Image (cartoon, grey):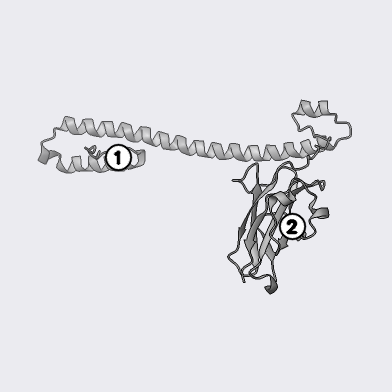
Amino acid sequence: MSRPHDYIPKAGGAFDAWQTNFIEAVDQFAKVLGLTDDQVTELKQTGKTWEKRYAELETARAAYREAAAGKAAAKDAYVALIRKYAASIQQNANATDAIRAAFGLTIRDTTPTAVEAPSSAPVVSIDTSERLRHTLHSSDAAMPLRKAKPAGVIGAEIWPQVGEVATTSQIANRDITNTLDSFSFVKLATRTPAVVEFTGADAGRTASYVLRWVNTRGDRGPLSAVAQATVGG
């Protein structure tokens, strides 16, 4: 069973308009409805108390908004000035890390963090919906549901082979640049997806792909499993 609708508004502004109309109706129909002068007076005095308190609240709200805006502006100006002096302190030749810490400033880490060689391989899926084109979508085997590359990785090397069908076992743990002459490096894909274009002579042939991550130092990770698709003509 649904709850009955309350005819008296709950919001302050809506209630204020509603009660004003109510009092006007009291004036208009008091005699017809047999309301006594004392009853009418009680309603009007209680209404005036409400109107006073509501007006005080609205005044306080306006003052709060003005104060809040003033506080925000003062903070923005103060923060801008602090940043100016903080930058000067950071660059001061006499400022030690202890002095920076005393000011609550950032202490810069001047020791470079070593970038490790990639330990995981890309996972590859191939979109063959366009003629003479494969669109390769890659993710990391350690996080296959995310598009993000592993930390420190700049991209994935793409090595396709057209014609001969390769298998993962044939290339496992082998150096692709030295032992798989039938594979050709086409690009370093710094984002996914990556597009590989073909010529009309490749139409109907099978393209096999292996990918591997490369980090900012040029270190290469393990090879991916072989991904294969037919080149659409």
Work out whether residue 96 or residue 135 is closer to the camera in this orientation and state it.
Answer: 135
Going 46% across and 37% down the picture, which residue do you hit? 61
In three-dimensional space, the C-alpha distance between marks 2 and 1, rounded to whole angstroms, equals 70 Å
Going 35% across and 39% down the picture, which residue do you hit? 11
Going 67% across and 40% down the picture, which residue do you hit? 77
Work out whether residue 181 or residue 194 is closer to the camera in this orientation and state it.
Answer: 181
- Near mark 2 (Cα within 10 A), the count class, few <14, some 14-19 or many ≥20, is many
Q: Please tell me the numbered disc located at residue 201.
A: none
- Check the image and name the residue furthest to the bottom: 200
The number of discs equals: 2
When asked about the image quadrant of residue 70, the answer is top right
- The quadrant of the rendering that contains the N terminus is top left
Give the foreground label among 2 and 1: 2
Position of residue 53 in the picture relative to residue 171 (left or right):
left
- Check the image and name the residue furthest to the right: 93
Give the amino acid at mark 1: Pro
Determine whether 77 is above or below 45 in the image.
Answer: below
When asked about the image quadrant of residue 43, the answer is top left
Visible residue check, residue 193: no
Q: Which comes sooner in the sequence, label 2 or label 1? A: 1
Which x, y percent locates residue 21? 25, 43
Which residue is tagged 2? 159
Which x, y percent locates residue 104? 74, 29
Work out whether residue 167 or residue 124 is closer to the camera in this orientation and state it.
Answer: 167
Going 74% across and 57% down the picture, which residue do you hit? 159
What kind of element bears circle 1? loop
Which x, y percent locates residue 170? 73, 51
Q: Please tell me the numbered disc located at residue 9.
A: 1
Give the amino acid at mark 2: Trp
